[in-house]
Amino acid sequence: MPPASVTSRLAAAAAPGFVLERSEAVPALIGRHQDFLFIAGLGGTACDVGAVTGDGAHVYSLGGAMGAACMMGLGLALARPDKRVLVVTGDGELLMNLGALAAIAVIDPPNLAILCVDNGHYGETGWQKSHTSLGVDLEKIAIGSGIKRTHTVAVDADVAAGARLLREGNGTAFVLLRVKPTEPAEFKRNFDASLLRDRFRAALQSR
Amino acid sequence: MDASLDQKSRTGWQHDLYDLLRRHDITQFAYVPDAGHSILIDRSIADPGVHSIPLTTEEEGVALIAGADLGGARAVLLMQSSGVGNCINMLSLIKGARFPFLTLVSMRGDFGEGNPWQFPMGQATQPVLEAMGVICVRIEQPQDVIPAAGAALTMAFKSGQAVAVLLSQRLIGAKPF
């Protein structure tokens, strides 16, 4: 018997259309990270953003409270209209609170963008398939929720348009990035929620 | 008693409460619609100085409050007691990170309630909030609204606590159906 971590990785077969490497596509979509304030979902996206920013103080990463990321982004974007806010979260985290897309769409802050890193799986809990491997299309849900600027990045040729959308200021943007079900970036993250809050607020006040 | 006077005495505190929240720099009003909060909701929609944010479920408001705080702004969550049950795990965010948190909860399943469906969550509201580290300030009388809300604002935004103001059905009126 191989160890559980190996069997779970073997079980994470990509659904058709999930071909991009997250380790390349996420940094390519974010570009110059200093241009954003980040909310990162729990699990893989917290590691992705931590690695891209070098554990930046302009990142607030969740370690629980699943389903919070998008609405935290809305509160932050409304509080700081002078900054661009980028929520980077996974398919599982987003699926837990799809209503947030509707709540955000009706406000439509121009300085908010959501990047959903969709690997079709719950990577933290043993690589069970998520709904997006089984036919659910989160970009269509975003469109149906009323978000007007959306894009799916499924192949390299889509990256440039996705990156542009995250930075355009005409209204809230939603970019769905489909990636292979592989491990996120190697990053030892901080789970102290209070320390991250203090650090984020202090850094923002001094910017 | 004059009917319009009676109406004013029953709702006057709601206008005072909105003004109090604004004086304390609340600029984001998140809500799931409820008759008990209708004046606060309508005032926030009409106020160009604030964001009025309709939610699809109450837990979204908990996360919104945390995001607002990261950006240095103050938000309040307006909900009915049944919505408290939808917030439980999301309150981990408030307790774990020590975000200041203020919610105004209009009670159901409480004094004089006529709908039996409201009792399970109504009666569980305060224990559930307290289990998640939220301090409850309960208001029964109109003259107590402003002092109690003022105390809650201080506890939340000066001391960084999580506070729920429970507006009882004795205060807001019970629904007889």
Image: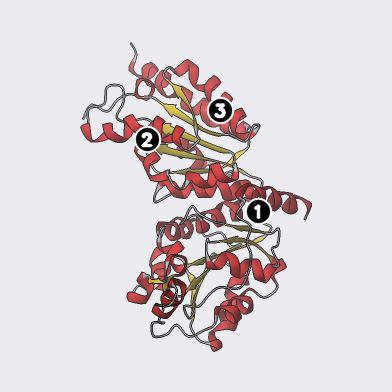
CA gap, disc 1 to disc 2?
A: 31 Å
Neighbor class of circle 1 (other Cα within 10 Å; few <14, some 14-19, many 20+) is some
Q: Are marks 1 and 2 on the same chain?
A: no
Please state which amino acid type lies under the numbered disc 1.
Answer: Arg
One can see residue B113 in this view: yes
Q: Residue at x 42, y 24 (%)?
A: B11
Alpha-carbon span between mark 3 and mark 2: 17 Å
Identify whether A114 is placed above or below B8: below
Q: Is residue A101 above or below residue A153?
A: above
Residue type of the residue flagged with mark 2: Ser
Residue on which the image places disc 1: A80
Q: Secondary structure at mark 2?
A: helix
Residue B43 screen position, x and y as percent: 49, 37
| Residue under label 2 | B81
Task: Count neighbours of disc 3 (C-alpha within 10 A) and say few if under 14, some if 14 to 19, many if 20 or more.
Answer: many
Q: Is residue B102 above or below residue A56?
A: above
Q: How many marks?
A: 3
Q: Which residue is mark 3?
A: B152
Q: SS class of the residue under badge 1?
A: loop
The nearer-to-camera label among 1 and 2 is: 2
